[in-house]
Image (cartoon, rainbow, N blue to C red):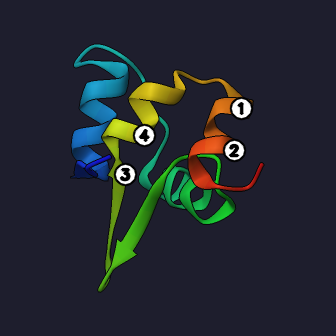
Amino acid sequence: MKKELIKISEFQRRRWGRGGTPLCSQAIRNHIRNGQVPGEQIGKLWYVDWNAFSRSNGNDLVAMVLKGAA
């Protein structure tokens, strides 16, 4: 399973589209810290693992399994 790490700004564009109202960057960082969104911090920048997020499709159980918590 290869990670596709994307910046938060790219995640906002892919997840909510150009016309949507995305969560702010701080909220997404908090979701990553809390394990609600798969991702990681590299240096000072935060990235979302798009492959893991796409597979989970908002399913909390799938997200926990992919993270390794279940």
Q: Earlier in the sequence, mark 3 or mark 2?
A: 3
- Residue beneath label 3, please? 48
The residues bearing labels 1 and 3 have C-alpha atoms spaced at a distance of 16 Å
Which residue is pictured at 44% across the width and 36% down the height?
Answer: 53
Which residue is pictured at 32% across the width and 40% down the height?
Answer: 50
| Amino acid type indicated by mark 2 | Met
The residues bearing labels 3 and 2 have C-alpha atoms spaced at a distance of 15 Å
Which residue is pictured at 36% across the width and 21% down the height?
Answer: 16
Q: Earlier in the sequence, mark 2 or mark 4?
A: 4
Label 1 sits on a secondary structure element that is helix
Label 3 sits on a secondary structure element that is strand
- Residue beneath label 4, please? 52
The residues bearing labels 2 and 4 have C-alpha atoms spaced at a distance of 11 Å
| Amino acid type indicated by mark 1 | Asp
The reply, left or right, for residue 24 in relation to residue 8 is: right
Label 2 sits on a secondary structure element that is helix
Label 4 sits on a secondary structure element that is helix
- Residue beneath label 1, please? 60
Tell me the quarter of the picture where residue 59 sits: top right
